[in-house]
Image (cartoon, grey):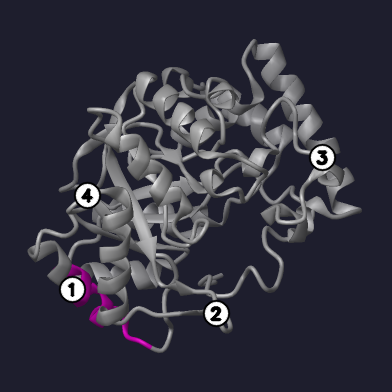
Amino acid sequence: MKQRKLGTNGPEVSAIGLGCMSFAGFFGDTDLDTSIACLDTAWEAGITFLDTANIYGMGRSESAIGAWLKGTDAKPVIATKATIVPKPTRHFRNDEDHLRSELENSLERLGRDHVELFYIHRREQERPVEEVAETLAKFISEGLIGGYGMSEVAPSTIRRAHAVHPCTAVQNEYSLWSRQPELGVIQTCAELGVAFIPFSPLARGELTNTPPDPAKMGEADFRRANPRWQEPNYTYNQQALGAFRSYAADLGVSTAKLAMAWVLGKGDHLIPIPGTRTGAHLKEWVDAAEMTLTAEDYDAIEMVLPVGFAHGDRYSDSQTLGIERYC
């Protein structure tokens, strides 16, 4: 697996990481043995960067990684997140007491005394981000984290935090059907030496050979509330994505591999973190870093899936809570 730098001062990691949200059952039933087998497959394939969060199954994802670490001598670079408080009503806390407590709980579940990267999962708008950066810088000085990151934030927030203490990484959704980061986040990260971590680079399963069927999604499936999976949007999106799947087939590659190669080619500071529950699905895209797209490929893909092609918003109104909008 090719390597990329996790920010200017961060470690070298695999060009493709593994998003571990699926270990919590957000996209269908899973179990600990399946998660551990997936992690084994990822490590054997050269993936050294794992992304999780305290909120994923209320610690379930972190605990799965911790259980895997106990049975292996692997030493992955791990990123986790905190700040989302789901009850009694969903809100966000970026204060030091909360972040420290949640970080300590995450470390206990992971079986680690530090993590290489710790994100604020959502920004608490009432609290100056400069104060948050000072808190995270304190955690770095204490050896609890190697660097800090932010998720679903605007370029202005990145600049303000980075001016207090260099930010390691920013994680926003980015794929062929969610391209908002092209309007400032990708460029800001490149300018400041911050890694950009695209999550859902495969559009939560849509950019694959066999897309998910909304009719078969479980009641707890995160996608059921997404407008893009609801009619008539779903049918319109399938018509557009069908042409992209055909283009991938003409190139002799899987849809997922082509979609991942497209993201990877958008900048050397991009480290996408596709998620999966199984090693079998991982094999559809794990070698995408070895694929280099030509200018002609990018032009052809743009013809098939022009920017803004998707029908429906990427989140429902309730899921949008906490996401910074800047354009």
Q: CA distance from mark 1 to mark 3?
A: 46 Å
Return the mark for residue 213. 3
Q: Secondary structure at mark 4?
A: loop
Q: Write down the residue under mark 2.
A: 87
Q: Nearer the viewer, mark 3 or mark 2?
A: 2
Query: Where residue 222 appears, x then y in whole percent?
Result: 67, 55
Q: Which residues are magenta?
A: 127-137
Nearest-to-viewer mark from 1 and 3: 3
- Residue beneath label 1, please? 164
Residue found at the very far bottom of the displayed protein: 126
Could you tell which of marks 3 and 2 lies nearer the N-terminus? 2
Q: Is residue 142 above or below residue 273?
A: below
User: Label 4: how many residues lie within 10 Å, few (<14), some (14-19) or many (20+)?
Assistant: some
The amino acid at mark 2 is Lys
Tell me which amino acid carries mark 3.
Answer: Asp
- The residue that appears at 24% across and 67% down in the rendered structure is 162
Distance from disc 3 to disc 4, alpha carbons, whole Å, reads 38 Å
Q: Is residue 50 above or below residue 223?
A: above
Mark sitting on residue 112: 4
**Label 3 vs label 4, nearer the camera:** 4
Q: Is residue 270 in view from this perspective?
A: no
User: Does residue 206 appear left or right of residue 180 in this picture?
Assistant: right
